[in-house]
Image (cartoon, helix red, strand yellow):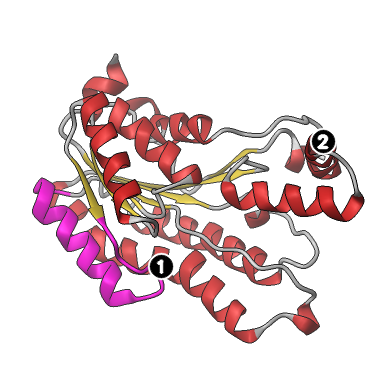
Amino acid sequence: MGINHMLKGKAVLVTGSTSGIGHGVAEAFAAAGANVMLNGFGDAADIERIRQAMTGTYGVDVGYSGADMSRPDDIRRMVQDTEARFGRLDILVNNAGIQHTAPVDEFPEDRWDAILAINLSAAFHAIKAALPGMKRRGWGRIINTASVHGLVASVNKVAYVAAKHGIVGLTKVTALELANAGITCNAICPGWVRTPLVEKQIEARAQQAGVSVDQAKQQLLSEKQPMTEFTTPAGIGALAVFLCSDAAATMTGVSLPIDGGWTAQ
């Protein structure tokens, strides 16, 4: 109950929250009593259904911003819209991300630019825009969805790994600068999460190897993780909510793996 009471009346913005990890995180905050600003691409009717379902289930105010995370102006406007709607922005979750895989010497330059823009620069622009209000109120929580790839590397993911390592660095500097401002900044580093993005990878592997989707799933997980289970968006959401609780008040600048043992090896 402590956490629920604490987030009542707080306002959270979760980028990339119309599906996957972001949706699970947004749901966890709504369940903890926070008002939520959703963001992401998708079918307008689907997004409206998600918004209404969250409002109906949790009795909180849920908004939506269609801001494009590759555009700094859009990001600034999204933060302003959140503050205008809820009168505040207490918790910022930088979660939007895209992926592309190819060897370094074959990696398309436009994909490199897009991945750095959305997976790294967007978080900087959102933090920069959110900080004045958080500083004024003397309380704020910034949570960046990094990845195990913020801590270790895998082949063919040069832009993603570079961006996620960048997120870990951004998290540390933000934490240090705000250490005595009542604002913490932490990164969550998931291993494999069964999102639509990963679902596509599993199906592609199953086809290539001529194995069942279930076998492809096991292969994918066991290549990296001692634990052959996916991390869930709900589990990541629960960790994000914990980082906003009083118990986590002195946790700042850390990168927390939630990865089935991937980075323990």
Q: Which residues are magenta?
A: 65-88
Q: Which residue lies at the image location 75% right of the left edge and 59% below the top edge?
A: 153
Identity of the residue drawn at 58% across and 67% down: 163
> Quadrant where the N terminus lies?
top left
Query: How would you rate the neighbour count of disc 1 (Cα within 10 Å): few for under 14, some for 14-19, many for 20 or more?
Result: many
**Residue 235 lies in the magenta-colored region:** no
Across and down, in percent, residue 29 comes to: 32, 33
Is there any visible trace of residue 148 in the rendered image?
Answer: no
Q: Residue at x 24, y 52 (%)?
A: 64
Q: Which residue is mark 1?
A: 122
Let me know if residue 129 appears in the view.
yes
Q: Is residue 88 left or right of residue 113?
A: left
Image quadrant assignment for residue 168: bottom right
Residue position marked by numbered label 2 in the rendering: 218
Pointer 2 local density, CA inside 10 Å: few below 14, some 14–19, many at least 20: some
Most foreground residue, 140 or 8: 8
